[in-house]
């Protein structure tokens, strides 16, 4: 596992966070916009690995005046700090309200028609989603915490900005900047993204596959949902005295929601074989009598005879069945003091998982073209997220 940079990134995001931005038209319209991710740090999209990151904003709007407001429209402009990344920055969709998008040279322009609002009427919360851009290393906003998605918004109503009485007191709100979403977590041990209602696949490293230079990797597949959620995967490695692995790695998976029906929340953890300890074992092998040396040898050469079984001492990797996987559920109101549990095989293997703990649907030793093991893989299903530890 490479050195984590998540602490610096999250600290940078927390420093940028402010209270939700509010703007009002002299008590007529109030609007609040904030990032869906909290802290507001999102992972770049990465075409090299196929990772698709998503950035999202939540919009709350209310008619706060005494009169009815007509032709209410929410508008916004979104851009990226590094303009060279704008070509891969896209509006994906909205949830809760239909919005149209057009792209300018360096801005995505949004227009969301709301219509008529009576005094005190609250617009149901709606959400706006963007594909996070691909990182461009060009000397502009390359350092951690300096690149971001920026979002400026404004509400128009009545005559908007076209009538003789159209002023910030009568017709539109002041153009306001929402909290930026910091783009970061290019390090393969931290992933943060909005998850659309259609679900998605999120992983660390390259497709969630462990390699010698990144020996622990995680992949989570989120099924379709009724509404969006968020995904965060954070991996850490700890020195430990396990007889099975060199470093005890954990995968903290945070995907709010419940997944009570198949295919459930499915996660796969892989470890490069270098992190699996070796052990000395005695094995039984066929052997044959060598007339020339008057000894039994572990060979089937035709000149040997009198086959029998022999034992020998050898070194091999700890079997995957011996490696222990533990799980710690997230703290919830229903489970304020969760305890760490050993994760066992699903019974039946297709699920469902036991209540409150995941189970293993598959564990596999992956070999190279010569038949030598290169990594171990475990696949889990569960109703909810939590922390997995391989030890």
Image (cartoon, rainbow, N blue to C red):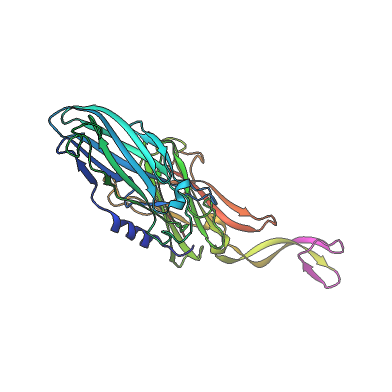
Please report the residue visible at 43 percent of the width from the left and 47 percent of the height from the top. 132
Please report the residue visible at 41 percent of the width from the left and 62 percent of the height from the top. 143
Above or below, comparing residue 292 to residue 332 in the picture: below
Of all residues, the one furthest to the front in this rendering is: 164
Please report the residue visible at 85 percent of the width from the left and 69 percent of the height from the top. 291
Q: Position of residue 170 (x, y in %)?
A: 18, 35
In this view, the residue in front, 49 or 290, is 49
In this view, the residue in front, 251 or 351, is 251
Q: In the rendered view, does 68 fall on the left or right side of 330?
A: left
In this view, the residue in front, 94 or 75, is 75
In this view, the residue in front, 200 or 64, is 64
Q: Which residues are magenta?
A: 291-308
Kindly tell me whether residue 383 is visible in this rendering: no
The number of callouts visible is 0
Q: Position of residue 128 (x, y in %)?
A: 35, 39
Q: Position of residue 285 (x, y in %)?
A: 71, 61
- Answer whether residue 307 is magenta in the image: yes
Please report the residue visible at 86 percent of the width from the left and 72 percent of the height from the top. 292
Of all residues, the one furthest to the bottom in this rendering is: 293
- Answer whether residue 143 is magenta in the image: no
Q: In the rendered view, does 179 fall on the left or right side of 164?
A: right
Above or below, comparing residue 155 to residue 83 in the picture: above
Q: Main secondary structure of the magenta part?
A: loop
């Amino acid at each position: 596992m490479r050195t984590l940079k998540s602490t610096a990134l999250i600290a940078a995001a927390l420093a940028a966070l402010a209270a939700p931005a509010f703007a009002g038209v002299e008590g007529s319209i109030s609007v609040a916009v904030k990032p869906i991710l909290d802290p507001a740090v999102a992972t770049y999209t990465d075409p090299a690995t196929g990772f698709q990151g998503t950035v999202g904003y939540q919009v709350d709007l209310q008619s706060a005046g005494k009169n009815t407001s007509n032709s209410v429209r929410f508008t916004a402009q979104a851009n990226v700090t590094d303009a060279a990344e704008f070509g891969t920055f896209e509006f994906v969709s909205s949830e809760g309200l239909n919005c149209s998008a057009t792209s300018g040279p360096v801005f995505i322009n949004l227009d969301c028609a709301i219509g008529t609002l009576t005094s005190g009427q609250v617009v149901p919360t709606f959400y706006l989603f963007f594909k996070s851009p691909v990182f461009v290393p060009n000397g502009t906003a390359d350092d951690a915490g300096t690149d971001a998605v920026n979002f400026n918004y404004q509400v128009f109503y009545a005559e908007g900005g076209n009538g003789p009485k159209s002023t910030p007191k009568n017709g539109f709100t002041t153009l306001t900047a929402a909290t930026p979403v910091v783009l970061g977590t290019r390090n393969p041990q931290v992933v943060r993204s909005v998850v659309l209602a259609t679900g998605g696949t999120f992983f660390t490293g390259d497709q969630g596959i462990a390699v010698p230079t990144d020996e622990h990797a995680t992949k989570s597949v989120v099924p379709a949902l009724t509404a969006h959620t968020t995904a965060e995967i954070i991996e850490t490695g700890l020195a430990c005295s396990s007889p099975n692995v060199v470093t005890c790695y954990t995968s903290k998976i945070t995907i709010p929601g419940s997944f009570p029906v198949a295919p459930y929340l499915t996660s796969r953890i892989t470890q490069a074989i270098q992190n699996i300890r070796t052990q000395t074992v005695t094995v039984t092998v066929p052997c044959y009598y060598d007339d020339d040396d008057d000894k039994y040898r572990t060979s089937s050469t035709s000149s040997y005879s009198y086959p029998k079984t022999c034992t020998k001492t050898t070194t091999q990797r700890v079997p995957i069945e011996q490696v222990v996987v533990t799980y710690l559920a997230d703290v919830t109101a229903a489970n304020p003091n969760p305890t760490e549990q050993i994760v066992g095989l699903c019974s039946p293997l297709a699920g469902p998982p036991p209540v409150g703990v995941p189970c293993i649907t598959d564990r596999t030793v992956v070999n190279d073209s010569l038949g030598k093991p290169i990594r171990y893989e475990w696949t889990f299903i569960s109703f909810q997220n939590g922390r997995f530890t391989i030890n």
